Image (cartoon, rainbow, N blue to C red):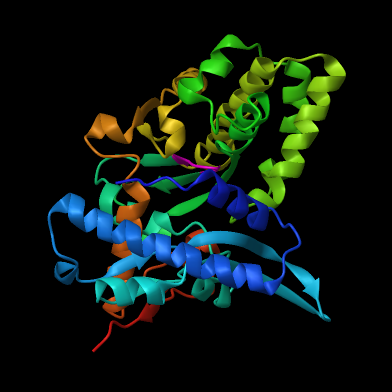
């Protein structure tokens, strides 16, 4: 199940995640607020499934990322790499009465990794095939690709962030409607617009796309400030919102195809690109992806084409990661994140006795 944030809560999360100056009191309150929402969502999931909270063995809770700085920053005379996810897990443990595994990314970063992406470990468990190579593309706010070579061992899996997924498209839709719409539903805006090739070429020049692997990115690069640069270009060159939506959508499709050609095709030929995440519901984006991957001979499919759920994919992933943690078993792929060793990711909040 998926439960929406209130508009006010969503704006506060975006404000904090966007780097707005806030005092420690507000971050503290937001941490417990989100923990309470997560606990309520777990209880709602129990009701929807027709089970009692006492029947739940454990909860895997990723939390809300409010900052992720894998490259590191100069801070107090040291180079500090950091990530922060909030949503107090103790509230979930108390209200459901079961263990909660949370705060997964920090252990990988402590081992020298980027702390992302983490889902490739579970994709290895669920999607690896004996006779063909599979590429999986998640399109959330950021796009990320996982490559599962034929009959691969865990150390042969690799994955990376391709660049903006829905983030810039969502920003255009929100700005165009004064915040009434949070995303381009079905890709309708982009379908009405025209791609501005000059703007697209300018966006393609972003250095991130050609960085060596492993690599990851997020709102700290492709967030509000980046979107504002696109809006400025639109105002200067007389582009309508639909044209900006079309260009942002084309950028996402291009960045995924470019990543495949740059980092996958020299070594492996994928049989298909399996798309998940919110972007899989954007028909215009999927159409542009299919057109770009046609020249590689790669068919673009969605999770739903396989009988799975794009909405549930990451929830399933963190349940699996939590299970491994509770068993005391490694649940990371150092080859993916760049860590020095495999780690047992997750912190455990025990239930009341």
Q: Position of residue 176 (x, y in %)?
A: 66, 24
Q: Position of residue 266 (x, y in %)?
A: 53, 39
Label the magenta part by its dominant secondary structure: strand
**Residue extending furthest toward the bottom:** 353
- The answer to whether residue 69 shows anywhere in this view is yes
Residue 186, quarter of the rendered image: top left
- Residue 139 within the segment the image draws in magenta: yes
**Residue extending furthest toward the right:** 236
**Image point 42% across, 35% down: which residue?**
269
Q: Is residue 159 above or below residue 275?
A: below
Q: Toward the viewer: 67 or 212? A: 67
Q: In the picture, which quadrant includes the C terminus?
A: bottom left
Q: Toward the viewer: 3 or 300? A: 3
**Image point 13% across, 59% down: which residue?**
51
- Residue 230 within the segment the image draws in magenta: no
- The answer to whether residue 128 shows anywhere in this view is no
Residue 53, quarter of the rendered image: bottom left
**Image point 76% across, 23% down: which residue?**
199
Q: Is residue 301 above or below residue 42?
A: above
Q: Which residues are magenta?
A: 138-143
**Image point 52% across, 36% down: which residue?**
260
Q: Is residue 296 left or right of residue 18?
A: left
């Amino acid at each position: 199940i998926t439960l929406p944030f209130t508009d006010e809560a969503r704006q506060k999360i975006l404000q904090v995640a966007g780097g707005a100056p806030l005092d420690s009191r507000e971050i503290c309150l937001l941490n417990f607020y989100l923990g309470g929402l997560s606990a309520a969502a777990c209880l709602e999931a129990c009701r929807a499934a027709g089970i009692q909270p006492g029947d739940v063995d454990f909860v895997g809770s990723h939390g809300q990322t409010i900052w992720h700085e894998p490259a590191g920053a100069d801070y107090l005379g040291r180079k500090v790499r950091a990530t922060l996810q909030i949503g107090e897990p103790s509230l979930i443990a108390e209200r459901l009465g079961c263990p909660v595994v949370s705060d997964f990314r920090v252990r990988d970063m402590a081992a020298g990794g980027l702390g992302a992406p983490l889902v490739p470990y579970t994709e290895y468990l669920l999607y690896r095939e004996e006779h063909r190579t599979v590429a999986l593309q998640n399109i959330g706010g950021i796009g990320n690709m996982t490559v599962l070579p034929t009959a691969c061992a865990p150390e042969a899996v690799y994955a990376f962030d391709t660049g903006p997924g829905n983030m810039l498209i969502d920003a255009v839709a929100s700005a165009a409607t004064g915040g009434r719409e949070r995303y381009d539903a079905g890709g309708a805006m982009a379908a009405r617009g025209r791609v501005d090739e000059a703007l697209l070429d300018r966006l393609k020049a972003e250095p991130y796309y050609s960085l060596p692997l492993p690599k990851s990115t997020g709102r700290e690069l492709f967030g509000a400030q980046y979107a504002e640069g696109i809006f400025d270009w639109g105002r200067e060159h007389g582009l309508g919102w639909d044209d900006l939506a079309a260009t942002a959508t084309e950028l996402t499709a291009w960045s995924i195809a470019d990543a495949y050609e740059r980092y996958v095709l020299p070594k492996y030929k994928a049989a298909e690109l399996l798309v998940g995440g919110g972007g899989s519901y954007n028909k215009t984006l999927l159409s542009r992806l299919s057109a770009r991957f046609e020249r590689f001979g790669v068919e673009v499919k969605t999770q739903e084409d396989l009988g799975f759920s794009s909405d549930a994919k990451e929830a399933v992933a963190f349940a699996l990661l939590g299970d491994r943690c509770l068993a005391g078993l490694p649940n990371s792929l150092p080859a993916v994140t760049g860590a020095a060793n495999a780690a047992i990711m997750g912190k455990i909040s025990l239930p009341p006795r």
